[in-house]
Image (cartoon, grey):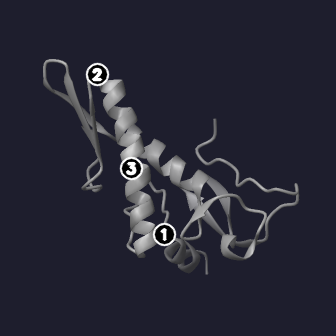
Amino acid sequence: MSMLQEVSVTNGAPPSVTNLFSFHGEQSFTFVEVDRDPRVSTTIAGVPMSFIETYADIAVRHALVEEIEPGQWFAEVKGISGAWGDGSDGAEAKNELRQSVLGWVALKLDAGSVVPVLAGFDLNPNRIREQAS
């Protein structure tokens, strides 16, 4: 599985490309002008949901998971205050964290707030466009 899922389109034609950005400097991905391209599926504040899901997956891989009491686990990611997960085991806590991060990112993007860069992955459309210029 690749780190970034492809943006889905409804008619099979590629969406219009506006900028390219680098992920860890290893691969290049296409950033599309989603607000103007009706072929791109679900977006939040112009960011494709597949990018947000990838960000949540990265967050889970960087999570600090600990057993705080017997049978009570807690997961969080440094830099993402307000998003956390808990559960009866580490896997459940990480799953809850992923769902929490998805909601947290959606709120941040809708509010126009900056989302912290995780492992080189930047969800901030304006900064991505500025870096590509």
Q: Could you tell me how far apart the alpha carbons at marks 2 and 3 are, in whole angstroms?
A: 18 Å
Q: Position of residue 79 (x, y in %)?
A: 27, 56
Side of 80 relative to 105 (left or right): left
Choose the circle earlier in sequence order: 2 or 3. 2
Q: Which structural element holds mark 2? A: loop
Q: Count neighbours of disc 2 (C-alpha within 10 A) and say few if under 14, some if 14 to 19, many if 20 or more.
A: some
Instruction: Count up the numbered dots.
Output: 3
Quadrant where the C terminus sits is bottom right
Q: Nearer the viewer, residue 72 or 20?
A: 72
Circle 3 SS class: helix
Which residue is at a point 48% across and 69% down the rendered structure image? Answer: 124
Q: Residue furthest top?
A: 70
Q: Is residue 71 left or right of residue 17?
A: left
Q: Quadrant of residue 15?
A: bottom right
Q: Determine whether 1 is above or below 36 in the image.
A: above
- Between circles 2 and 1, the one closer to the viewer is 2
The quadrant of the image that shows the N terminus is top right
Image quadrant assignment for residue 49: bottom right
- For badge 2, the amino acid type reads Asp
Q: Position of residue 82 (x, y in %)?
A: 25, 54
Q: Classify residue 44 as left or right of residue 114.
A: right
Q: What residue would you read off at disc 3?
A: 101
Callout in the foreground (3, 1): 3
- Amino acid at the residue labelled 1: Asn
Mark 3 residue crowding within 10 angstroms, few (<14) / some (14–19) / many (20+) = many
- Name the side, left or right, on which 20 lies relative to 127: right
The label on residue 89 is: 2
Observer-nearest of 81 and 79: 81
Residue at the spot 48% in from the left edge and 62% down from the top edge:
122
Residue found at x 45% / y 47%:
56
Q: Quadrant of residue 128?
A: bottom right
Q: Which residue is mark 1?
A: 124
